[in-house]
Image (tube, grey):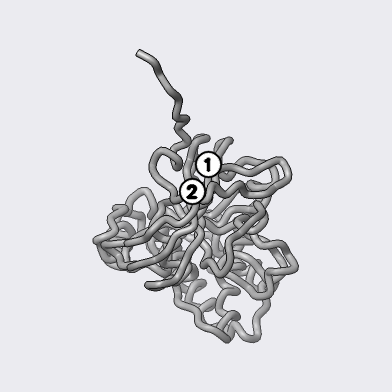
Amino acid sequence: MRSSQPNTHKSAAKEIKEKIAAIHKLDLREQSVDDLVPLMRELLTGHALRCLDFDAGLLLFRGTPCEKLPHRFADVSYAPAERVKNDQRANRAGIPMFYCSATWHPPFFEAGVKKGEQIIISRWQAREPLRIAGFGYADLCADDPHSDREKALQESLKQLPETEQHLTEFMIDCFTQPIGPGEEHRYRLSIALTEALGLGEQFDGLLYPSAAMPSPSHNLALHPRCIDEQKLVLQYVEHLSVNRVETETIDVCSLNFARGVAPDEKLHWLNRPGNWILREGAQANEHCL
């Protein structure tokens, strides 16, 4: 009788490949997230997941296209449940999720802004340590905006054991496949994977490659509790006009700047462009010599 537990790396890798192939054969139009979660849990069982522990002070960035200036904290935070109309990368419709990026550049690509359009970029800082689930590649992959994402990911995958390679590649594919209008059912794989990982229970968030950038850049999906419990706090909000967004060059013009949030949850716009002094929160004072 065939053992259910593989006893060699080769058989373990083969079993992983078979499970992944079976998942790929499913018609996602006919499978609910609830159907897929047990399959993802079975796939993950017995395999080590790379866990990333970040100290307090971590900076994260969030961007949204700007049609009108936001005036309240809620306008730059995660969307409430009633506004989450469709499935997204890591959450079902009706379930909020806080999406952000590890660096300043990806939000411009994620928002899809073009020349002549405007964007709101907000910077957030962790007040407490964050435990983030990764896919085993992030700390092996060079964070180089000039490199090709697929080549960089393949090079990082080669550094992993064979069983981890197949599983990691599958998880990355779940989160980086391009999904157009009317194809929202294809999000069900990444949503099921997120739920199988225990986001919000075992981890504060999930780190995954940006699908919008051709170079390797990192996005995060954080449980809304990180915001509600102030594990992550807003530092500033900046209103920018876009001149050019390319992999090697992002050309923008600052239009307005708000730092922090008032007690009434309103953003305090300074009605002046942002600059390095404002972004880093320095206080200007007179000093007599």
Counting labels gives 2
Q: Position of residue 150 (x, y in %)?
A: 31, 68
Q: Which mark is residue 60?
A: 2
Tell me which residue sits at (35%, 54%) in the image. 160
Q: Is residue 14 left or right of residue 195?
A: left
* Nearer to us in this view, 287 or 12: 287
Q: Residues within 10 Å of mark 1 (few under 14, many from 20)?
A: some
Q: Are marks 1 and 2 in contact (CB under 8 Å)?
A: yes
Q: Is residue 119 left or right of residue 182?
A: left
Q: Position of residue 78 (x, y in %)?
A: 63, 58
Q: Is the residue 231 above or below the residue 105 in the image?
A: above
Query: Could you say which quadrant of the image residue 182 lies in?
Result: bottom right
Q: What secondary structure is marked by label 2? A: strand
Q: Residue furthest front?
A: 288
Mark 1, residue position: 125
Could you tell me if residue 106 is visible in this image?
Answer: yes
Could you tell me if residue 207 is visible in this image?
Answer: no
Q: Position of residue 43 (x, y in %)?
A: 55, 64
Q: Is residue 98 left or right of residue 176?
A: right
Amino acid identity at mark 1: Gln
Tell me which residue sits at (58%, 61%) in the image. 69
Q: Position of residue 94 (x, y in %)?
A: 72, 68
Q: What secondary structure is marked by label 1? A: strand
The alpha-carbon separation of the residues under discs 1 and 2 comes to 6 Å
